[in-house]
Image: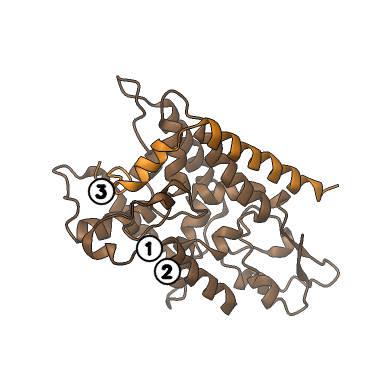
Amino acid sequence: MKIRRIVQSIAVFVFNPWLANFLSGKLYTGRLKQACVPVLNCHSCPAATGACPIGGLQAALGDKPFNWITLHVVGLLGVVGAIGGRFACGWLCPFGYLQDGLYKVPSPKLRVPRFLEWGKYAALAVLVVALPLLWVDEFGYSTGPWFCRVLCPAGTLEGAVPLLGVGAEEIPERPYYLVVKVAILVFFLGWMVVSKRPFCRVACPLGAVYGLFNRHSLVQLRVDAARCVKCDVCRRTCPMDLRVYEGGDASGCIRCLSCRSACPKGAVRIET
Amino acid sequence: MRRVVPWVLIAVFLGLAVAGALTGSIQPVFQKAIRICRECIGIG
């Protein structure tokens, strides 16, 4: 699937073209930042060209009184999901690309227990929606983007590391959240070497949203049961460790089409 | 029948996106995105 690698590489630069900002520690502040990109890409990354949809959703939900722009962000995510389900995870997401790359590092490999995959729905419901919407301070303002603050390793890698590295921001006196976030980043980076896309499967709220659409998206993956011999080549090649013959519309499928290329029987096809 | 569902979903969510853009204010999202979000990087 060389073409997917090429598309992923291009997507990294489309969403993060302002590379010189890494040296200055400044952010791109043009009008494109009003638009959400369809992938998890921290808008505090100096090179980022658009807003992160999860950061944007938390900012919109936290605005008081209720800001109808929330519907706009939800609508955009819904359109992307209804077209291709999680295809953006497989073809466009820079953090997914990083995970694909790290899994190629030679090491013992571990399977991710299936029950952990519920974690991404908890992250979405609690950290992205409930806390920013409902937890307000004494003045009635939202207490902030809790997913970004306590969990998001993409924000730590793309935002905190370069900004603190060039001295654009200073480490606070009591860096509790930073310590937690760096620990989470290191943990996930290590996990990415030994397991397939652990962050996407266990903690990504954007993947959780798109995954809800997989069953009814315009682009569908189908397995011809008459041809399939359940040899599990699809599972070995799948970046999400799925047995595609158990359901091409499973919420974990990122539509990368690796299984279609690998299937020795040609049993996997795309349907629109 | 099944193939109608994605088109309905696309239409509904496109409608939400447009309605939200017309009635809401993008400023909170924009302001968060053009400044270093200290919470986002774990120092705020």
Classify 10 Å Cα crowding around label 1: few (below 14), some (14-19), many (20 and above): some
Q: Residue at x 42, y 76 (%)?
A: A105
* Residue A177 image position (x, y, % from top left): 27, 44
Q: Nearer the viewer, residue A267 or A190?
A: A267
Query: Do the residues bearing badges 3 and 2 touch, measured as CB atoms within 8 Å?
Result: no
Query: Do the residues bearing badges 1 and 3 touch, measured as CB atoms within 8 Å?
Result: no
Residue position marked by numbered label 1 in the rendering: A189
Q: Disc 2 and disc 1: Cα gap in Å? A: 7 Å
Mark number for residue A12? none
Q: Residue at x 63, y 47 (%)?
A: A79
Task: State which quadrant residue A272 falls in.
Answer: bottom right
Mark number for residue A193? 2
Q: Residue at x 48, y 59 (%)?
A: A198
| Rendered view: A116 above or below A18 | above
**Residue with the most extreme left position:** A173
* Residue A25 image position (x, y, % from top left): 23, 58
Residues tagged by mark 1 and mark 3 found on one chain of the structure: yes
Sequence-first disc among 1 and 3: 3
Three-letter code, disc 3: Leu
| Figure colour scheme | by chain
Classify 10 Å Cα crowding around label 2: few (below 14), some (14-19), many (20 and above): many
Marked residue chain, label 2: A
Three-letter code, disc 1: Leu
Q: Is A257 left, or right, of A167 in this rendering?
A: right
Marked residue chain, label 1: A
Q: Colour of chain B?
A: orange
Q: Is A214 left, or right, of A31 in this rendering?
A: right
Three-letter code, disc 2: Val
Quadrant showing the N terminus of chain A: bottom right
Chain coloured brown: which letter?
A
Residue position marked by numbered label 3 in the rendering: A178
* Residue A103 image position (x, y, % from top left): 46, 71
